[in-house]
C-alpha cells in the first residue's frame, strides 16, 4: 500500500513547482530565525530543514507513509541548501522585502495544505482526517521551528493562519467531490487561502475570543 | 499484523466511556492552557487536540501502529470539539471546580495508562515496553501541551504523577498474568492510580531527591 | 523488510560496547540536566531516556523501522537505569570530571553517527539520507533534552558539533564505497569525529557567520 501511495504521490504533477517554492520559502524563514538566534551554520541548516519538511514529515508519520516524503526526493535537499545560501547572502534584502516574503509564505502554506490533503486522500483516509493533515502539513513546520528556537509558536496567535488553511482544505475537498477536476480544486483552494489570509492581515481579523 | 492490532484495539470494549472522559478532560485542559496564553480559537483547538491525543500518538508511532489510533475513530474529533466548546463557554466554572478537574485528570491518566499497556500488549511487545508505553500514553499529551506553549513540562516536577501511572501499569500486568480477567486488572489498575495520586497530593509526597 | 533490517541491525556486532557507552553517557547527561531543573526522580528518568534514545528513535521513525530500535533490546533499559543511578550517586564527581564527560559525550556522538549511517544504509536509502540520519541519530537526543527542559538547544550554538558528525558520516560512507571493510570505516569515522571535535573545542573553532 505504501508503494502505491508513493507512486501516486502528488510531487510529480504540475503542483510541483509550487511545492518547490513553498519548500524554499519555509527553508529561508527557518534559516533567518536561526540567524537571529545566533545559531551556527549547521544549526541554521537544521532549522531550515525542519521548517521546510517538518509539516509534511508529521503528516507522513501520522498516516504511516514511510519512508517520509522528503527522504525519497533529492530535490528537497538542493532546494533547502539553496535556501540556506540565499538567507545568508541576501539577508538584508530579504528582510526589506517583507511584503514579498509574506506572499511567498502564504503561497507556501496554501500549497502545503493542498499537498497534505491530496496525500491523505491518496492514503484512503476520511475527509476530516484529510482536512487535519492539510493544516498539519501547512503549519507544523513553523511550529517545530518555534519550538526548537524556544519561542511560543507564532501561528497560535497570528491572524487567521491555520484557519485559512482549514478553509482551503474544505474548498479543495468540496470541489473534488462536486466537480472532480484536480486542477480546478487545487487552484481554487490555493486562491482561497491567499485571499483569506490577505484580507485577514489587511483588516486585522482575528479569532481571538475574550473570555 | 497492523490490521489485527487495530481489530483487537481496546477502544471497542467497556473501557470506552472512560477513554472518552479522559479525552474530553485532556482536551479541556489543553484549551484552558491555550486561552491563558492568549492563543486564538484555532490555536486553542490545536493545543486541545495535541493534549488529548498526543500520548497515544507517540505510543502508536513508537510501536509502529498505523495510522495512529485517533485517525480511525471519528468520536475523538467530536469529543475534542466538545471540549473546546465547554472550555470557552464554562471557563470560569471549570476553574472554580478545580477539585473535579483534578479528579477527571486523574481518571484520564489512569485510563490512558491502562489503554497504553493493553495496546502494547496486543502488539506483542515485552512487559517493560508495555509499562513504558502506559506511562507515555498517560503523560506525553501534557508534556506536548507544555512544550508547545513554551513551558517547562509540569509533570516533571509534580507530585507522584508519572509514578502513579507506572504503579498502575505494574498492577495491571501483574493481575493479567496472575488472574487474567481483564475487567479485574483494569479496574484495580485504575483504582491504584487514583489512590496513589490522591494520597500523594493530600500528603505532599514527592520523589524530589536533593543532591 | 522491517524484519530483515532488524536482523541485520548493527547492535549485534562489535560496535556494541561503544553503543552501550554512548547510551550510558547520554542518559547521564540527560539526568544531570533534569536534576539542575529540579525535576523529580521519574522526570529525570524520562529525560535520561529521551536523551539516550531520542536520536535513534527519530531516525527509526523517519526511515520507517518499527518498532523503534530500543524497544527490542532490554540492554538499553538496564543501561539507562544505571545512568540514572550513577548520576544521582556521583553527581559531584561527574561534574568535576568535565573533561572525561566531554570525551564520553564525543565518543557517544561519534558512535551514534556511525550507527545511524549503518542502519540507514541497511534500510536501502540514499547516501545523503544516510548522512542526515547519522547526524540526526547523534544530535537529536540532546535537542529533545533541551526542548523538554525548555532551553534553546545547545548544539545549535556549540563549536563544530553536528559538523563533526557530518564529517564522520562522510568519512564512513567514502571508506565503505572505496574499501568496503566495515571495521576500518567505523574506526576511522569515529576517530574523525573525535579529532575534529577535540581540535575545534581547543581552538575555539566555530561556524558562526556574522551577517
Image (tube, coloured by chain):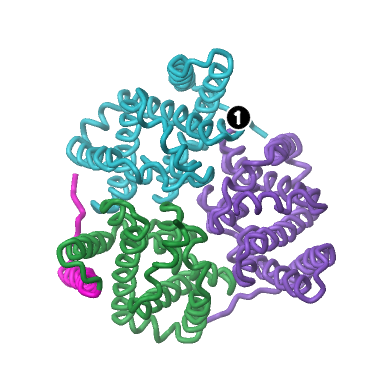
Chain colours: A green, B cyan, C purple
Give the magenta range: A183-211
Could you tell me which chain the residue with mark 1 belongs to? B
Left or right of residue C203, residue B157 in this image: left
Is residue A159 visible in the rendered image? The answer is no
Observer-nearest of A123 and C197:
A123
Principal secondary structure, stretch drawn in magenta: helix
Left or right of residue A74, residue A184 in this image: left
Left or right of residue B42, residue A7 in this image: right
Q: Is residue A109 above or below residue B162?
A: below
Residue in view at x 80 percent, y 67 percent:
C185
Q: Quadrant of residue C92?
A: top right
Residue in view at x 58 percent, y 30 percent:
B208
Is residue B87 visible in the rendered image? The answer is yes
Q: Which residue is mark 1?
A: B127
Locate the C terminus of chain A by quadrant.
Answer: top left
Observer-nearest of A184 and A84:
A184
Q: Is residue B130 above or below residue A203?
A: above
Measured from the top left, where is residue A55 in percent x and y? 41, 61
Locate the N terminus of chain A by quadrant.
Answer: bottom left
Q: Judging from the image, what secondary structure is the residue with disc 1 in?
A: helix
Measured from the top left, where is residue C179 in percent x and y? 82, 73
Measured from the top left, where is residue C19 in percent x and y? 75, 51
Residue in view at x 61 percent, y 66 percent:
C125
Q: Is residue A199 magenta?
A: yes
Q: Is residue A8 above or below residue B181?
A: below
Q: Is residue A65 above or below residue A184?
A: above
Q: Is residue A42 magenta?
A: no
Observer-nearest of A202 and B55:
B55
Amino acid at each position: 500500500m505504501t508503494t502505491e501511495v508513493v507512486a501516486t504521490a502528488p510531487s510529480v504533477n504540475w503542483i510541483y513547482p509550487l511545492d518547490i517554492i513553498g519548500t524554499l520559502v519555509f527553508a529561508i524563514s527557518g534559516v533567518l530565525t536561526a540567524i537571529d538566534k545566533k545559531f551556527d551554520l549547521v544549526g541554521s541548516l537544521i532549522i531550515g530543514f525542519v521548517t521546510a519538511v517538518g509539516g509534511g514529515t508529521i503528516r507522513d508519520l501520522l498516516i504511516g507513509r514511510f519512508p517520509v516524503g522528503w527522504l525519497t526526493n533529492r530535490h528537497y535537499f538542493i532546494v533547502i541548501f539553496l535556501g540556506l545560501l540565499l538567507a545568508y547572502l541576501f539577508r538584508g534584502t530579504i528582510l526589506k522585502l517583507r511584503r514579498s516574503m509574506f506572499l511567498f509564505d502564504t503561497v507556501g502554506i496554501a500549497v502545503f495544505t493542498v499537498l497534505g490533503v491530496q496525500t491523505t486522500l491518496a492514503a484512503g483516509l476520511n475527509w476530516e482526517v484529510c482536512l487535519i493533515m492539510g493544516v498539519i502539513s501547512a503549519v507544523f513546520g513553523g511550529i517545530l521551528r518555534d519550538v526548537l528556537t524556544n519561542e511560543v509558536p507564532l501561528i497560535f496567535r497570528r491572524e487567521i493562519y491555520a484557519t485559512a488553511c482549514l478553509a482551503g482544505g474544505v474548498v479543495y475537498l468540496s470541489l473534488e467531490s462536486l466537480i472532480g477536476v484536480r486542477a480546478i480544486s487545487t487552484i481554487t483552494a490555493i486562491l482561497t487561502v491567499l485571499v483569506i489570509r490577505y484580507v485577514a492581515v489587511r483588516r486585522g481579523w482575528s479569532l481571538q475570543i475574550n473570555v
